[in-house]
Amino acid sequence: MSELGSRAKRLDLSLLRVMRTRWHERWLERFAILLSKAGENAYVWFGIGVIGALVDPDRRWQWVVMAFAGPVAIVVNFGIKLIFRRPRPVLDGLPPLGGAPSSLSFPSAHATASFTAATLATRISPELAPLVFGLATLMALSRPYLGMHYPSDVLAGGALGGAFGLLIPLPDPTGAG
């Protein structure tokens, strides 16, 4: 491994250790666990897409695409995890505060699905950007906070999700073309 790679790995581990040892009041841990569970299988993003489809009939099919994009992003993410095969972090004396469906860590599926859905939701309804990107960021940060991912897993997942969200085509709401 190069010197730069070694430094990056040490920084990643240091940031993870900080996130696992600071700001761990009981209420904040419960909130992070709740966020993390809401992100499993992109449930919260699917729900937001369904609600959007119900309350915004002019853009119904765009919201339907957004609803399914998060779960699809998780499937694609898992294929990427199989390529990299990075194990989840293990910190002596700091067990993770949650479970995960696989032992693979890179990239974070929560971050990938969250930023895919947030990017699509913003393309559909730009005024939602602060809300959906705020939620996506909190959801992604909950993963290293709980000890489930390295910070670099979350950064990679967020970047991947943002790219997916920009590349996924949305139906024309006017029905033209």
Image (cartoon, rainbow, N blue to C red):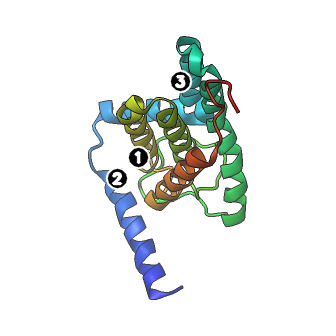
Residue type at tag 2: Met
Tell me which residue sits at (41%, 66%) in the image.
13
Tell me which residue sits at (64%, 55%) in the image.
104
Gap between marks 2 and 1 measured at Cα: 9 Å
Check disc 1 and report the residue beneath it.
Answer: 141
Does the CB distance between marks 2 and 1 fall below 8 Å? Answer: yes
Quarter of the figure that contains the N terminus: bottom right
Q: Which mark is residue 48?
A: 3
Residue nearest the observer in this picture, 68 or 75: 68
Q: Select label 2 or label 1 by which is in front.
A: 1
Question: Which sits earlier in the primary sequence, circle 3 or circle 2?
Answer: 2
Residue 67 % position (x, y) = 62, 28
Horizontal side of residue 23 vs 141, given as left or right? left
Check disc 2 and report the residue beneath it.
Answer: 19
The local crowd at label 1, few if under 14, some if 14 to 19, many if 20 or more residues have their Cα within 10 Å, is: many
Gap between marks 3 and 2 measured at Cα: 28 Å
**Secondary structure found at label 2:** helix
Tell me which residue sits at (51%, 46%) in the image.
111
